[in-house]
Image (cartoon, rainbow, N blue to C red):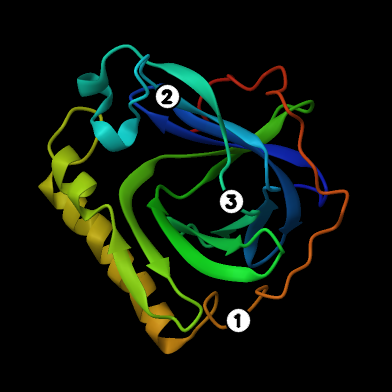
Amino acid sequence: MGFEAGRTVLRRYWRGGRISWIGSYVVVADDERGLRIWQPAGVSYWRLMTPDGRTHHDGTIDELGPTELTAQPWIGGPVMPFHPADGSPWSVWWFFDEQGNFDNWYVNLEDPFRRWDDGGVAGIDTADHALDIVVAPDRSWQWKDEDELAAKTGSRHYWDAAGAATIRENGLAVIELIEAGKFPFDGTWCDLRPDPTWQVPAERPPGWDRPQAV
């Protein structure tokens, strides 16, 4: 059963049995193509951080030591993540500027998402794979965070060398779509204008920390 358009859902990253990142989104559509969700500009999200401000970009969970989910303001314009219905190991994010104009795509390599619905609160769970792809409107692209993928390879709670190779292969499969101008890189939804009612609560709802969906 898909999520109803207009519903607020949570998007959670997990690592080592802990929520590492969480944010609230509004469902745009949940259909045969996949799940589209909207994050307005100016909202807060929560990520694991050390007391001195270090995040997952600065080391593995073990290397960081004590961390807490800490509220952070989203910098920039609104975004629309899209999770394919076919279980692809990535999501594509449409980034818009503060005037609502399409800026770029962002490919986040990650586990296929798993949805959950507890009635009063619902969402999706996934795990980030470090490596990303930034895609300009003309479909020129570049890898992002290759160093982070390499640094975490072989670490507890992450992936081994074979897993890292698979992550890159998944990225190369997306690059084929990018260079061919195929969906979702064919201009679809680049002219989207949000409904003014697409707003999210300032705080995490009760039940945000429910167990990971499996």
How far is mark 2 from mark 1, CA to CA?
A: 34 Å
Q: Name the side, left or right, on which 166 lies relative to 194.
A: left
Judging by the rendered image, the residue that carries numbered circle 3 is 76
Percent x, y of residue 79: 62, 55
Amino acid type indicated by mark 2: Leu
Judging by the rendered image, the residue that carries numbered circle 2 is 48
Judging by the rendered image, the residue that carries numbered circle 1 is 187
Amino acid type indicated by mark 3: Gly
Q: Is residue 116 visible?
A: no
Q: Nearer the viewer, mark 1 or mark 3?
A: 3
Q: Which mark is residue 9?
A: none
How far is mark 1 from mark 3, CA to CA?
A: 21 Å
Which residue is at a point 59% across and 20% down the rendered structure image? 210
Which residue is at a point 66% across and 57% down the rendered structure image? 36
Compare marks 3 and 2 and give the one earlier in the sequence: 2
Q: Name the side, left or right, on which 119 lies relative to 131.
A: right
Percent x, y of residue 110: 39, 49
Compare marks 1 and 3 and give the one earlier in the sequence: 3
Task: Tell me the crowding category of disc 1: few under 14, some 14 to 19, or many 20 or more residues within 10 angstroms, Cα based.
Answer: some
Amino acid type indicated by mark 1: Gly
In the image, 22 versus 49, the foreground residue is: 49
Q: Are marks 1 and 3 in contact (CB under 8 Å)?
A: no
Percent x, y of residue 50: 35, 18
Quadrant of the rendered structure where residue 158 is? top left
SS class, disc 1: loop
